[in-house]
Amino acid sequence: MKTIIVPTDFSKNAYCALYYVTQLFARDTCKFILMNSFENQVTNLTSRIDIGKTEAVVNELYDTTEVRCEELKHKIIRDTNNKSHTYHTIATSLSLTRAINQLVKKEDADYVVMGGKGSKGADNILMGSNTLLMIRKIQNAPLLVIPSPLNFKPIKKIAFATGFKRPYSKKELEPLVTISSLYEANIKIVHVNKKEKMSDIQRVNVHELFKLLGSAHPENTWLYDNDNSYDAIGSYVQKEHIDILAMISYKHNAIVRLFREATLKKIAKHATIPFLILPKID
């Protein structure tokens, strides 16, 4: 059974992401955990009232949020009618990232799934501030970001963008392979070529990557560098009708981290297909 955490702000975009992931894993037995954090409401309200009333305000927010979570639960059950899926709800006053990270560890979650933007998202920005924060802060679980609106269709092609600079492990690629296997989708390994030749380390990593992705029939695609890796990958995604774009998030090396965050942020803000961010496992 898969455990999937779906944070929500009760917006239409959040519901679209929830519905999409229920269709993505329609044939699997899944436990969905619907979570809402009302931390910002607590901060805003308690800053304007007497300290003695804080507990009453927090209790009221818990009650209100729990009701809305239950309403969301009943709606998705009604709309999907999938007996293999179960739903649990959590209302929390913790920050969204802290609550999710704690729950990932407690539940050994397989995925975290969220919409690209919340209720206040501007139409011309496809990834909201919460989503970008999640990309930087979520640990030990893959994050699947669903742009809105997006109708589900069977996955045929997955692009895995990588530079071959680090070794890969079976465990960190498992979420990618799992989605691929559900639909027998091909994984297109996409590399933006900045030099004429790969280093010896890159060649070793390419060989190991193909071994690890063997069941997904991986194909290697080299894109020529035009001084903008995002544009090269974005053009490829559109031209080849890619259904999901995946990357590994590297966190420990400071220089790599800065590059990673810049690249992820650019891609995330303009993503028109699901974006799967895989955590690096050392």
Image (spheres, grey):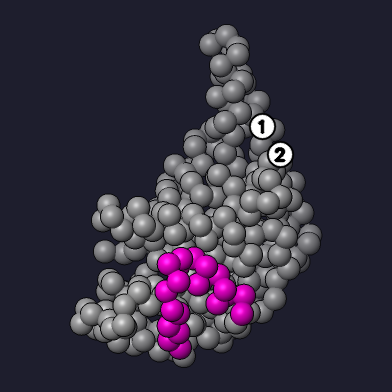
In the drawing, what numbered circle is on residue 181? none
Residue 11 screen position, x and y as percent: 71, 46
Does 236 appear in magenta?
yes
Q: Position of residue 181 (x, y in %)?
A: 52, 83
Dot 2, how many residues are within 10 Å of its Cα: few (below 14), some (14-19), or many (20+)? some
Q: Residue at x 70, y 76 (%)?
A: 153
Is residue 138 something that shows in the picture?
no
Q: Which residues are magenta?
A: 219-239
Please say whether residue 164 is visible from this viewpoint.
yes
Q: Residue 196: x and y, percent?
A: 31, 82
Question: Taking 164 as reference, is 111 left or right?
Answer: right
- Reading the image, the residue beneath label 1 is 63
Q: Amino acid at mark 1?
A: Asp
Q: Which residue sits furthest front?
A: 226
Tell me the residue that label 2 is attached to. Answer: 67
Q: Residues within 10 Å of mark 1 (few under 14, many from 20)?
A: few
> Could you say which is closer to the camera, residue 232 or residue 177?
232
Q: Secondary structure at mark 1?
A: helix
Three-letter code, disc 2: Val
Q: Quadrant of residue 130?
A: top right
**Residue 103: x %, y % from top left:** 46, 49
Residues at circles 2 and 1 in contact by the CB criterion of under 8 Å: yes
149 is higher (above) or lower (below) than 95? below
> Is residue 77 within the magenta segment?
no
Q: In which quadrant of the rendered view does residue 220 lie?
A: bottom left
Residue drawn at the location 79% of the way across and 60% of the way down: 78
User: Which residue is at a point 63% across and 71% down the rendered structure image?
Assistant: 24
| Secondary structure of the residue carrying numbered label 2 | helix
